[in-house]
Amino acid sequence: ALHRLVVLLALHGWALNLYPREIFAKMLVQPLLRALNECLKFSVDENQVSHFQPSRQAVPVIVAVISWLHTIAEESNLASPTDFYSDGVSQISVGALFDDLQRMKRASPRERSKNFHICAYPFLLSPGCKRNLLQMESQIEMYKAMLGDIKFSESQRQITVDPYFHLEIEREHLLKQTLEKIKQTDAKEIRKRLRVSFKGEEGIDAGGVTKEFFQLLSEELFEVNSGLWSTKYGNDVNWFNSDNTWNDNNYELIGLLFGLALYNSVLLDVRFPLAVYRKILGLPLGLEDIIDDDLRKGLQQLLEYEGDDVEQVFCLNFEVTWMELGEEKRLELKPDGANIPVTNENREEYVLRYVRWVLVDSIQPQWDSFEKGVMKVMESSSLDLFLPEELELLVVGSPDLDFEALEVNTKYEGGYDKNSPVIKNFWKFVREAPKDTQVQLLKFATASCKAPIGGLGKMDFMIQRAGPDSAQLPTSHTCFNTLILPDYGDNYEKLADLLGRAIIECEGFGLE
């Protein structure tokens, strides 16, 4: 073992000296990924089922070397996570990857050391692959929850089963009724597939109503001025309000709804900093996770100060102070901390303790309740496959909206094609519209303001003909990301007027 460690340290130094960041991925990682892609074989049988058949000798060796390079890259910031995504792994069917993941999770540590599992190296999996695995896990859990609720009627001599967790609420009381319903519902029931309905509206939830429900819920649930979130960081950040000590149940319900959106593959409009996703994944937190720019820079300045008079210059001790309801509060970071000055020798300890207090200790009750809610839904899921940045992308989507990629990927029905005059005018409208209008259009057609993992070019989108020219407004089937567009012909002004009105005025799934 010592000999192996010496060899690895020597190789580590060799890689750092000869391959700086500019060429590390190009010269070391990419050639190995190309070799890996060649070795990852899968076949398709007569039933069109894919079978993963990796080269038993080559793949584990190549992956072991890539894993070593990945460790070096992480430690020395020599490459980005995207440099390690494998196209070959992405082409493996989700079913084959899921089987590999489940075998790995069932295996004992000893069995894992003897057998190769591609999912043991999640840095090779693209965010899209990881999302697909998580979705398959959720679908299986939904099926289990449904089977666990089978009922037998003695009088009618028949078996009944309801595959859905039904949530019927009024728009006017969205948040209140949702929280009340969640409180009254058993955790097993919540793990069924969610089906939402708004009272008084006839929309059938094939996914679109659920997406709109979470969009509207996000606006209320994550409102910074609700008392649940700190107001120190403005309206663009949701961070737990350490002063709120009377709302533990609500934090648990928020966590449960957060988990429910993740479980049902619905995007949320939440503005959590990356530290929240690191905490969900159980990763350590550091100075870079501090949200307050001034505090982070001040602590960094303390660490980087080159003089030998830290105590005299910074005048700090192991104590923090803050204001709560107009009253100054004090807390010692260690026993007798008020009488222990920060010096050149102990400043690293001070920063570590301060960071822990800000990100962990000061919000521990609120965080524990939130995490409990999340895990009621996501307890057995494979979230540990994700990096924090990838998990954030899975939860909130990407604000980068590439409508040119969406245009290339769009399909047409009802007689339309990409050369139809109204279609050409539609894309002209999209290209010339301001960003806010583009976002509203996306929300109108898909019930989401963000792009999913992979961007708009990876999203299924369809434009369907809604009869001949008329004064009718465009409509949509958000469940299927489908825009229903009357054939306004080559009249651009008419399309711009009616489509603009539709995306601003229309809300809800009522049929009129």
Image: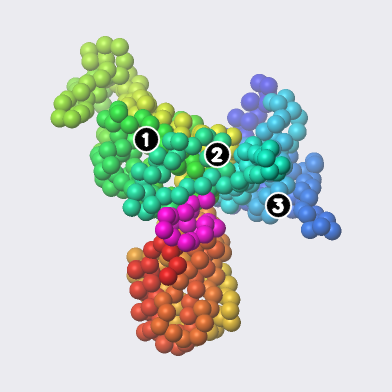
In the rendered image, residue 81, in percent from the top left (x then y), is placed at: 54, 46
In front: 26, or 203? 203
Q: Amino acid at mark 1?
A: Asn
Classify 379 as above or below 53: above
Rendered image: mark on residue 250: 1
In front: 410, or 472? 472
Badge 2 or badge 3: first in the primary sequence = 3
Q: Residue furthest left?
A: 326
**Visible in this render: residue 331?**
yes
Q: Residue at x 49, y 71 (%)?
A: 483
In the rendered image, residue 196, in percent from the top left (x then y), is placed at: 48, 52
Does the magenta portion include 146?
Answer: no
Q: Amino acid at mark 2?
A: Glu
Rendered image: mark on residue 189: 2
Badge 1 or badge 2: first in the primary sequence = 2
Rendered image: mark on residue 93: 3
Q: Range of the magenta residues?
A: 195-212
Where residue 10 sits, quadrant-wise, is top right
Q: Residues within 10 Å of mark 3 (few under 14, many from 20)?
A: some
Q: Amino acid at mark 3?
A: Ser
Element assignment for label 1:
helix
Q: Nearer the viewer, mark 1 or mark 2?
A: 2
* Number of callouts: 3
Specify the quadrant that holds the N terminus. top right
